[in-house]
Amino acid sequence: MNRSNRFFLHLFSFLTFLALSSTVGCAQNKKDISVPSDPKIRKNLSDEQLLDLVQKQTFRYFWDFGHPVSGMARERSNKSFDYGDEVVTTGGTGFGIMSIIVASERKFISREQAAERTKKIVDFLWKADMYHGAFPHWLNGETGKTIRFSPKDDGADIVETSFLFQGLLTARQYYTADNAVENDIRNKILWMWEGIEWNWFTQNQNVLYWHWSPNNGWSMNHQIKGWNECLITYIMAASSPKNAISRRVYEDGWANSNTFYNGKKFNDITLPLGFDYGGPLFFSHYSFTGLDPRGLKDKYADYWEQNKAHTLINRAYCIENPKKYKGYSANSWGLTASDSWQGYAAHSPTEDLGVITPTAALSAFPYTPEYSMQALRHFYEDLGDKIWTPYGFADAFSEEHNWVAKSHLAIDQGPIIVMIENYRTGLLWKLFMSSPDVQRGLKSLGFESPAIK
């Protein structure tokens, strides 16, 4: 199927949706952010005011709803049969750590509050379960013990670990003050970063393996091959100060796949890499919350052009709307993995269920600012009474099926805040790309970028 394997696994969780869990964790720190808990639609906002509001309100997911013990991001805001209040997500927390930096810079919270919450997360991770230095997909936010993601996925997940450390390395470049809190943040991140045995996850082959379990070993046997959301995993693995992979692993593993090259035209737009029509839009978001695609090139692609083409193809498909779904238009577009009216799905032009997911268009602000702003105004001004919530926009909606998700997901909310900020100031891109380790790793894989010194 034309989807990310990560979300293919999600689909088999058969998530069922219950009421929005507004009673767990939501009372924390509410006084710290000047956004009403029962939001009303505000008229006549300028573009800048609207972007401020969306970032601030969406940030509540990570601040008010962060786990009270660990500070980490909960996987989702609603409950289903296999979720409890204690499930936190490592990858989503990476996006959350970046969101806290945005909130600090935009004065939603103070720098001291941001550092304190980040230190809570780092201190928790320092003692949590890890496997050859890598973290599992889910942790118990109270105890730090692994919660298995699927029957054999009960150990290391290096893709989720790469999303987490994309955020942590960004934080290490941000918290540079010479005080006890920020010194401790930097030191613990460095020690954990140095301890990840990226090269061990090759099994002495020229490819990275996604999972390892102390109970099941390598039995999931999941090689990480492109094109999808996992580019950052290879870049992090190459950037390791002590356990880096070689360029050969990147070329023979990641780029050696029948789903890597494309080169065909869709809606008269050439797509360099990936599945036909590009797949779900999160492929152009997750790896690029920290990794700056502007001018980023290697012998395979120009990654700015790749992500822009993917976004434009996705939008053009929604405008064409071959299945004639209600609500699709030039102002209402964006197909990516999210909840849907029939369960979790990796929405894309080749898996179109009539569901629009706001994070798709909103996290695309760097690539298509005019079109993303059109979508944002439609979501807020025209549909806000249905989809605008205390945590920003609902995860997804379908006018065709008269359905709105009673849910928010960390991996959907985080990129909205972060990618809007990268569009506005490039903040997270500048921080992450300033890491000497990241610069060395990119060079070792043959990348060029204006950010590489």
Image (spheres, rainbow, N blue to C red):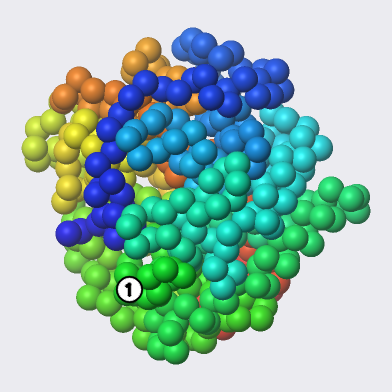
Tell me: 449 left or right of 308: right
* Residue 233 position (above or below residue 143): below
Q: Residue at x 29, y 72 (%)?
A: 260
In front here: 34 or 7? Answer: 7
Q: Residue at x 33, y 24 (%)?
A: 18
Number of dots carrying numbers? 1
Q: Residue lying at the far front in this picture: please name it.
A: 215
- At which x and y percent is residue 243? 60, 81
**For residue 293, side relative to residue 104 (left or right):** left
Does residue 228 appear to the left or right of 106 in the view shown?
left
Where 143 sits versus 283, above or below?
above
Residue at image location 56% in from the left, 14% down from the top: 37
Specify the quadrant of the image occupied by residue 435.
bottom right
Q: Is residue 83 left or right of residue 277?
A: right
* Residue 361 percent across, percent down from the top left: 37, 39
Classify the position of the N terminus by image quarter. Answer: bottom left
Q: Is residue 369 above or below residue 52?
A: below
For label 1, the residue is 219
Relative to the observer, which residue lies in front, 348 or 303? 348
Name which residue lies at 68% across and 73% down: 194
Frontmost residue, 216 versus 74: 216
- Quick check: can you spot residue 132? yes
Q: Residue 125: x percent and y percent? A: 65, 54
- For label 1, the SS is loop
Mark 1 is on which residue type? Ser
User: Is the C terminus in the top left, top right, bottom left or bottom right quadrant?
Assistant: bottom right
Q: Quadrant of residue 220?
A: bottom left
- Looking at the image, the residue that sits furthest to the left is 323
How dense is the environment of label 1, judged by Cα within 10 Å: few (below 14), some, or many (20 and up)?
Answer: few
